Image (spheres, coloured by chain):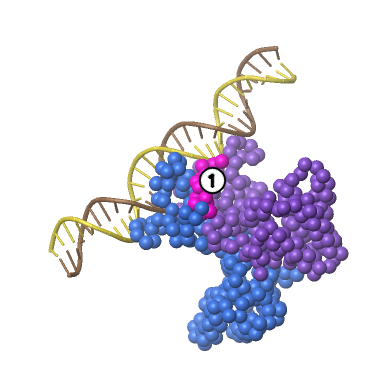
Chain colours: A purple, B blue, C brown, D yellow
Amino acid sequence: MRTHELVLGWIEKQFSDGALMLGGRLPAERALAEQLEVSRTSVREAIRILEAMGVVRAGVGSGKDAGTVVIADPAAALGSALRLHAATRHFPVADIVETRVLLESWAVSRAQVDSPALAEAADLLDRMDGGIDSTEGPEDFLALDVRFHLALAEAAGNTVVSAMMASLRDAIEGYAAELTRKLPDWNATSARLRAEHRAILDAVNAGDGAAAATLVAAHIEGFYREAGLAAPH
Amino acid sequence: MRTHELVLGWIEKQFSDGALMLGGRLPAERALAEQLEVSRTSVREAIRILEAMGVVRAGVGSGKDAGTVVIADPAAALGSALRLHAATRHFPVADIVETRVLLESWAVSRAQVDSPALAEAADLLDRMDGGIDSTEGPEDFLALDVRFHLALAEAAGNTVVSAMMASLRDAIEGYAAELTRKLPDWNATSARLRAEHRAILDAVNAGDGAAAATLVAAHIEGFYREAGLAAPH
DNA sequence: TATTCGATGTGGTCTGACCACATCAAGTAG
DNA sequence: CTACTTGATGTGGTCAGACCACATCGAATA
């Protein structure tokens, strides 16, 4: 058992025991090292792992934002892992897209109609429409698009699925942005995407989960197919 | 930009450029530190993150297993992240189980009948049956059960879904083991589970994906419900 | 030829130091 | 009394250098 794993185990036990909650803070690195009778080096390596897992955030200085505080950003960890393994060619992009279709189709089919996430989704659609005549380009549209799809996923009320959706989107964000720049007629594509968004949200609000799932699958696969990615299947 | 992130970026670029492949090795920590003009501390922190992500494995000594070599164990990273966030109470176990049902149902419905993974699954079923009269207890059965479900998931041919399935299983492994110990009549439960496994595999081999998906969902939800977990929905 | 044993190179750990930064309290000028 | 300055304090970030445990290889030896 390496020393930093010992530290990791101690911290994880604090979580399990409820001694460390969301928003709480770890002891200072030097104090924790002395308490566990290990070097600060080992403490730091453990904290670095927790940070990569989206469990803590390290902040210098003093006061509110200082120290190592407990957060909850599961998508960060999953996203980094997916991106790294995609970089090693172990995860084909097609598999990532296919998985996203699977999760998001399920999410919209299970979306709760009264969910506040759906209200946020509607608001995002309005903002996309409003920005079409301004100077907004594909980059701003994509940012709103990401949030729209995440809001849709959150409406299903499953935290794990939401986190996975966010991480998948994260892992292929650069890929999607690149594809967007290659599109021949952005205005036409944007208009079509916005119309499809409306149709999806309408189906969800109407309680027709099956239709929403079909629409969402066609929406995602259509984008990647138009942009040049080989169809997942 | 913190120093270890710089190192991380350099290594990730090596992946993207194809200069670092699966099975390859990173430069020695001291050499890499000198090359990038950073301290060995920062190099080590970057490597520790990659190790937590399941991208590299560090080995001491000399020779074949020594040094920091590139591996591909995405399930390790996803599993650790899920387990940690479950420990912080941010991921309800019910959500994890529900997600597993979703992914595995999809996987069996898309399983390729001629997949070697299905042959492995059949072999695992035989081994479960063979061990029922020996001294094997729930622990050994569960180990085979895990591999059976993973083989099923792999038959769909989506690496991302396979990795997520493995990590989900990993995150709730301790939970499942605890539930198993509480069961009143293990022999009866074991017999039922094995029969359900057969039915699932038969449906997949018959090409009836829809039936297999239904059976697999009932199989998983049934186990957790019997063991005392509130039904996911 | 077979065995022993040191040289070498790897990651693992530790110590002690210094830096950048953010806050807070004491002191000071108005 | 107020407003500003300034130093003390505590945080994570980084660094250099040392030593350890381990695995392998090769030269010296029985």
| Residue B225 image position (x, y, % from top left) | 69, 75
Q: Which residues are magenta?
A: B1-16
Q: Say which of B57 and A85 sits in front.
A: A85
Q: Chain of mark 1?
A: B
Which residue reaches farthest right?
A206
| Residue B15 image position (x, y, % from top left) | 51, 54
Q: Residue at x 54, y 41 (%)?
A: B2
Quadrant of the image occupied by residue B88: bottom right
Residue identified by numbered label 1: B5
Is A15 a magenta residue? Answer: no
Q: Residue at x 82, y 57 (%)?
A: A195
Q: Say which of A40 and B116 sits in front.
A: B116
Is B7 a magenta residue? Answer: yes
Residue B185 in view? no
The relative height of residue B28 versus residue B226 in the rendered view (above or below) is above
Q: Residue at x 49, y 52 (%)?
A: B14
Q: Residues within 10 Å of mark 1 (few under 14, many from 20)?
A: some
- Quadrant location of the C terminus of chain B? bottom right
| Residue A215 image position (x, y, % from top left) | 78, 65
Element at label 1 = helix
Image side of residue A54 versus residue B48, left or right: right
- Quadrant location of the N terminus of chain B? top right
The amino acid type, in three-letter code, at marker 1 is Glu
Q: Residue at x 80, y 69 (%)?
A: A210
Which residue reaches farthest front?
A184
Image side of residue A61 versus residue A38, left or right: right
| Residue B206 image position (x, y, % from top left) | 65, 85
